[in-house]
Image (spheres, grey):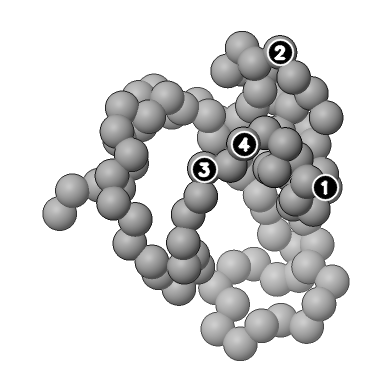
Amino acid sequence: MKQPLTPKPLLELRSREIEVIAPRPYGYRYPYPISYIVGYVCTLGELGPFAPNDEASERAILPFSEAESLDSIKGNAEFYNEALRRCNVDRRI
């Protein structure tokens, strides 16, 4: 089976400890209530077909303005800004 993404060198961006402040969802497979977000930066050699799974029903590649309006981006601006910096994009939120 072909991989949906073909990354060329994968570099860890950073990690961040998070605390889930909601009741544990049924079937939640991650450490609870303390968990981690890990971000990666890479260049894609190819963007293959997407296969929905238990965690993601779709994917989207968003324009900067749309991505920056998302609470998940605004709440993790340090990740986003570091990814932009590493990709030599002259933009910050």
Amino acid bearing label 2: Asp
Residue 90: quadrant of the picture: top right
Asked whether the residues under the numbered discs 4 and 3 touch, taking CB atoms below 8 Å apart as contact, a structural biologist would say no
Q: Residue at x 70, y 71 (%)?
A: 32
Quarter containing the C terminus: top right
Pointer 4: what residue? 63
Task: Tell me the CA gap for discs 2 and 1.
Answer: 20 Å
Task: Tell me the CA gap for discs 3 and 1.
Answer: 19 Å
* Earlier sequence position, callout 2 versus callout 3: 3
Pointer 3: what residue? 61
Q: In this rendering, would 85 be left or right of 9?
A: right
- Is residue 79 visible in the rendered image? The answer is no
Task: Tell me the CA gap for discs 1 and 4.
Answer: 18 Å
Q: In this rendering, would 70 be left or right of 39?
A: right
Task: Tell me the CA gap for discs 2 and 3.
Answer: 19 Å
* Earlier sequence position, callout 1 versus callout 4: 4
Asked whether the residues under the numbered discs 4 and 2 touch, taking CB atoms below 8 Å apart as contact, a structural biologist would say no
Q: Secondary structure at mark 2?
A: loop
Pointer 1: what residue? 75
* Earlier sequence position, callout 4 versus callout 2: 4
Residue 87: quadrant of the picture: top right
* Earlier sequence position, callout 3 versus callout 1: 3
Q: Residue at x 66, y 83 (%)?
A: 25
Pointer 2: what residue? 90
As drawn, the residue found furthest toward the bottom would be 26
